[in-house]
Image (cartoon, rainbow, N blue to C red):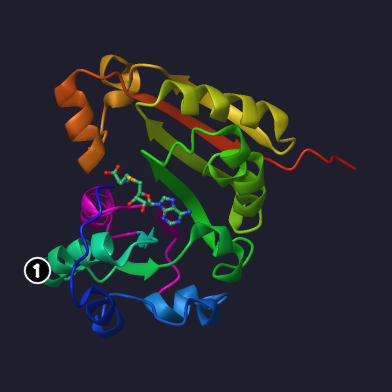
Amino acid sequence: MRLRNVPGARDDIANSPFTVKNETDCKGKWSEIFGNDHPVYIEIGMGKGQFIMELAKQHPENNYVGIEKYSSVLVRALEKQAEENLSNLFFIRMEAENIVEVFEKGEVAGIYLNFSDPWPKDRHAKRRLTSVQFLNRYEQILVAKGHVIFKTDNRDLFNFSLEQVELAPNWKLLNHTFDLHHSEYVKGNIMTEYETRFVEKGNAICRMDIMQEQMNII
Ligand code: SAH
């Protein structure tokens, strides 16, 4: 995400009715926060929020939490939410590494990752949002058989992610495509900001749907 410092972004986030402030206090309390017990889906690294806002609009029967580490990007989502006023959508400014401190096991129905940072250097592999380290974190917050749906145009990151799913004992690859926009999975696809840009450039978009499944059968 191109970062331009937005003056006052931190204050705007702190004062917004659409952001959650002390996110670690929310753990185990998400149904209280939303005022209902609808399933909660999260997007990690949501950028300016186009995807999650459209999803929240299309699915009032679900709750959504958008997570983004940079204030200057998140603040753009807040501006849109101020117009839309979707009651099933909240935002958190946080580093996703700490996700297990914010959601209890079983509190998250599904996770979306869209155009996540590639971290191309090998020594940074564990920072990639589809690394085994992150898959382990997701296991600690997802419902049984919860899904992670990941889109990217970065073939290296996608291949790495396929390998990580193989390595992670409790994850199963349900389906994947190296060219979403020419595949059956494009039906109902919601475009993200990055996706719009990359599709215009002619890049193929990769997508995978993986499921968390406890393998230790007694
Ligand atoms: N999902 C959006 C933005 C993609 S860019 C889209 O598809 O258009 C990736 C975004 O993820 C950036 O805004 C970046 O700040 C955020 N991000 C990357 N790593 C993160 C992490 N560990 N925790 C929280 N946000 C992260």
x, y percentage for residue 86? 21, 67
Question: Measured along the vertical axis of the image, is residue 200 above or below residue 50?
Answer: above
Q: Is mark 1 within 8 Å of ligand 1?
A: no
Which residue is rendered at x = 67% and y = 48% of the image?
Answer: 136
| Observer able to see residue 212 | no
The residue at the point 34 percent across, 68 percent down is 91
In the image as oriented, which residue stretches furthest toward the left? 83
Residue 47 in the magenta stretch? The answer is yes
Quadrant the C terminus occupies: top right
Task: Give the image location of residue 50, x and y in percent.
Answer: 21, 50
Magenta region, residue range: 36-61
Q: Position of residue 124 (x, y in %)?
A: 58, 41
Q: Quadrant of residue 122?
A: top right
Horizontal side, residue 208 vs residue 146: left or right: left
Circle 1 packing at 10 Å, graded few (<14), some (14-19), many (20+), is few
Q: How many marks?
A: 1
Instruction: Out of 161 and 208, give the one closest to the viewer.
Output: 161
In this picture, residue 56 sits left or right of residue 173: left
Identify the residue under disc 1: 83
Answer above or below: position of 112 versus 98. above
Quarter of the image holding residue 105? bottom right
Mark 1: which secondary structure?
helix
At 20% across and 25% down in the image, what residue appears?
199
The reply to whether residue 158 is in sight is yes
| Residue type (three-letter) at the residue carrying disc 1 | Glu
Q: Residue at x 56, y 75 (%)?
A: 27
Residue 74 sits above or below residue 21 on the image: above
Q: Residue furthest right?
A: 218
- 144 w.r.t. 6: above or below: above
